[in-house]
Each structure stands twice: as structure tokens, then as C-alpha cells.
Image (cartoon, rainbow, N blue to C red):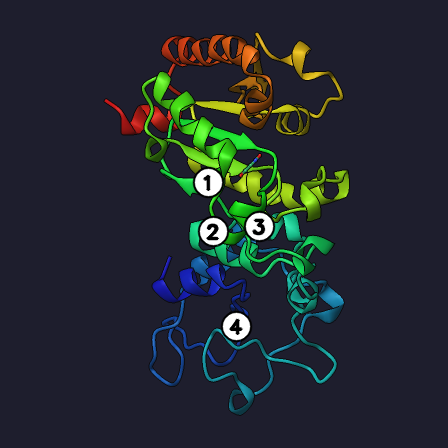
């Protein structure tokens, strides 16, 4: 096949050739203008195997030599005939608008953060001081997820920097983790007024951000801190006492998820710290026995 024919076919342009007995062809199989023309065998091969001929009624006849097309890729046209390509309609159809979820699900860290910073998807945007996006190692094995920013977090723009954070840090240290080694986020990125509970609608609007953070981090374990985090992530109404003490699985990648008490609760009920310690050890044990996922395997030898 000639280069020209190859490219024309790739573009979906039909190749038109003079009929075998057309006067524009000399006996030697060359045209009068001395440019090489395809041999007859090649012409019939094209029609037979590559593209079916147009319906007989619509097939234009070659006219006299002076009307011949300047090259073999321009079909001779009657006034009422034009080539129609399959994709014509599709090319003109506008692309369907992308949903907010889909847009967010395709973002990188930079885009995600920028999108969250200017988010106005719920009414919390009117009362927040700033968006509390999340903090920590983008490749962390541990992802800690709390409820929502409080007053300190709203002011400083970082999760768990208030009193609850002052307890979360030593809890992590107790299992050998510096705060900087993990990633910390919340169900909500904006503070609810008077630290009220997040509404289901607020959590739903914020969910795509957290979902994308989880996809980007690909943590090996999620520690859900407190009832709100646990119930939202596991999409359940079950009490926290029944959710802790076992390993759940999150999402399509089935990331192990362990539930523990919120540090703010532990500050109010210090006797429950022992149970939280059990939860942390369960999480640490789970991670030690969990096989590395495909993404991690390619990073870690
Ligand atoms: N409580 C939370 O759940 N998250 C924070 O960031 C701070 C307090």
C-alpha cells in the first residue's frame, strides 16, 4: 500500500480511482499527465477488500479528461453528492458537562487544594475563617481522619492543633509515629458553627475531597477517630462502641480501617484511654500483617 493511501485511509477518506477503461489512463497504465497511477489490480484490490463502493445510483461517473480530478484522492463530485463520515454528528455534539464529583476525582494535590479553598458547596463557607484541607505526608501509610475543624483549626488552617490535637500527637507517638509521618484530615474541611455536628448534607458535599485525598495517598491503614468519622466512612449508624475492636475495610481497594475514640472524648473520659490504646495496637498489628498493595509494591522493594 502506498504511503498516501495509508494516510488517507487512516483519515477515513475514501480513495477514488478511474475505471479501468477510463480515457485518462493510457495503455501502459499511466495517466496523460505522466504522474504514476495505481495499476488496475491495485485498484480492484482496494475496492474489494478495503472499502465497499458507494451505492451504484450515487456513484459519480468520470467526465472528460479536462474534468478529471487533480489527484486520486479527490472524488469527482456531482452537485448533489458529498461524502458523509460516520463521526460527523459526534464531532458537532457538545461534550456532556462533567459532574463536580468527576472533576474532583481527577485532580492532583494542587488542583484539589485550590478547589477546596474556594469551595462554596455548603453554607459553612459563609462562617469559616479558612478551609482546613489536611496535613502530613502525601505518601503516608497511616491516614488519620477526624470529624471537623474546631475553633483553633479554623484559625490556624491545620487539623488537630487544639486540645484534641495535643492528645492525638502522643497517641500516635505511642505506636511509634511522628505527626509528620501520617496524613491527618477530617470528614469536613470547614468548621461548623459552635462545633455542632456535621449534617449529612455537609458531609456529602465534602466527601469528594476526602475521597480524592485517600486515592492520592493510598494509605495502608485508616484510623477513624471518633463516632462521626467512623459512621461517615463506614456509612453506618452503628454506635462507636460496636465499631471499634475490629478491622473494617474501606472502599474498592479495601483499605483496612480501625475505629477508635476521639481524643476530645478521651480528655473528658480518661478511663477510656486504655480502650483507645487497644485500638491503636490493633491498627499497628493489622498494618504489620497486611500485604503491600500493588501501588506500594512498586515503590517499596
Ligand atoms: N476535632 C476533629 O475532629 N478534628 C480536628 O481537626 C480538630 C478537632
Label 2 secondary element: helix
Other residues around mark 4 within 10 Å, as few (<14) / some (14–19) / many (≥20): many
Q: Is residue 115 visible?
A: yes
Closer to the chain start, of discs 4 and 2, is 4
Closer to the chain start, of discs 1 and 3, is 3
- Residue 231 sits in quarter: top right
The residue wearing badge 3 is 104
Mark 1 vs 2: CB contact within 8 A: yes
The residue wearing badge 4 is 18
In front of the other: 110 or 170? 170
Location of residue 253 in the rendering, given as x and y in whole percent from the top left corner: 52, 24
The residue wearing badge 1 is 161
Distance from label 1 to label 2 (Cα)? 8 Å
Nearest to the eye among marks 2 and 3: give it.
Answer: 2
Location of residue 277 in the rendering, given as x and y in whole percent from the top left corner: 47, 11
In front of the other: 12 or 28? 12
Closer to the chain start, of discs 1 and 4, is 4
Nearest to the eye among marks 1 and 4: give it.
Answer: 1
Q: Is mark 1 within 8 Å of ligand 1?
A: yes
Amino acid at each position: 500500500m502506498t504511503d498516501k493511501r495509508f494516510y488517507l485511509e487512516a483519515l477515513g477518506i475514501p480513495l477514488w480511482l478511474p475505471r479501468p477503461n477510463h480515457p485518462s489512463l493510457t495503455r501502459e497504465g499511466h495517466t496523460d499527465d505522466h504522474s504514476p497511477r495505481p495499476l488496475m489490480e491495485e485498484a480492484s484490490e482496494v475496492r474489494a477488500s478495503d472499502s465497499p463502493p458507494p451505492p451504484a445510483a450515487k456513484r459519480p461517473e468520470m467526465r472528460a479528461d479536462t474534468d478529471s480530478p487533480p489527484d486520486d484522492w479527490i472524488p469527482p463530485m456531482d452537485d448533489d453528492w458529498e461524502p458523509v463520515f460516520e463521526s460527523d454528528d459526534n464531532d458537532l455534539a457538545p461534550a456532556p458537562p462533567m459532574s463536580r464529583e468527576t472533576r474532583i476525582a481527577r485532580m492532583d494535590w494542587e488542583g484539589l487544594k485550590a478547589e477546596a479553598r474556594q469551595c462554596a458547596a455548603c453554607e459553612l463557607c459563609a462562617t469559616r475563617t479558612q478551609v482546613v484541607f489536611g496535613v502530613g505526608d502525601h505518601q503516608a501509610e497511616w491516614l488519620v481522619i477526624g470529624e471537623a475543624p474546631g475553633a483553633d483549626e479554623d484559625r490556624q488552617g491545620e487539623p488537630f492543633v487544639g486540645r484534641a490535637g495535643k492528645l492525638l500527637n502522643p497517641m500516635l507517638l505511642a505506636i511509634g509515629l511522628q505527626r509528620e509521618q501520617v496524613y491527618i484530615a477530617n470528614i469536613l474541611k470547614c468548621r461548623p458553627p459552635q462545633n455542632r455536628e456535621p449534617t449529612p448534607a455537609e458531609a456529602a458535599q465534602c466527601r469528594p475531597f476526602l475521597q480524592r485525598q485517600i486515592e492520592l495517598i493510598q494509605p495502608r491503614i485508616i484510623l477513624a477517630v471518633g463516632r462521626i468519622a467512623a459512621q461517615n466512612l463506614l456509612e453506618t449508624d452503628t454506635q462507636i462502641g460496636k465499631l471499634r475492636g475490629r478491622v473494617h475495610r474501606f472502599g474498592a481497594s479495601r483499605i483496612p480501617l480501625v475505629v477508635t475514640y476521639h481524643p476530645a472524648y478521651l480528655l473528658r473520659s480518661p478511663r477510656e484511654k486504655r480502650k483507645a490504646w487497644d485500638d491503636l495496637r490493633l491498627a499497628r498489628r493489622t498494618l504489620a500483617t497486611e500485604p503491600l498493595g500493588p501501588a506500594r509494591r512498586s515503590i517499596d522493594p
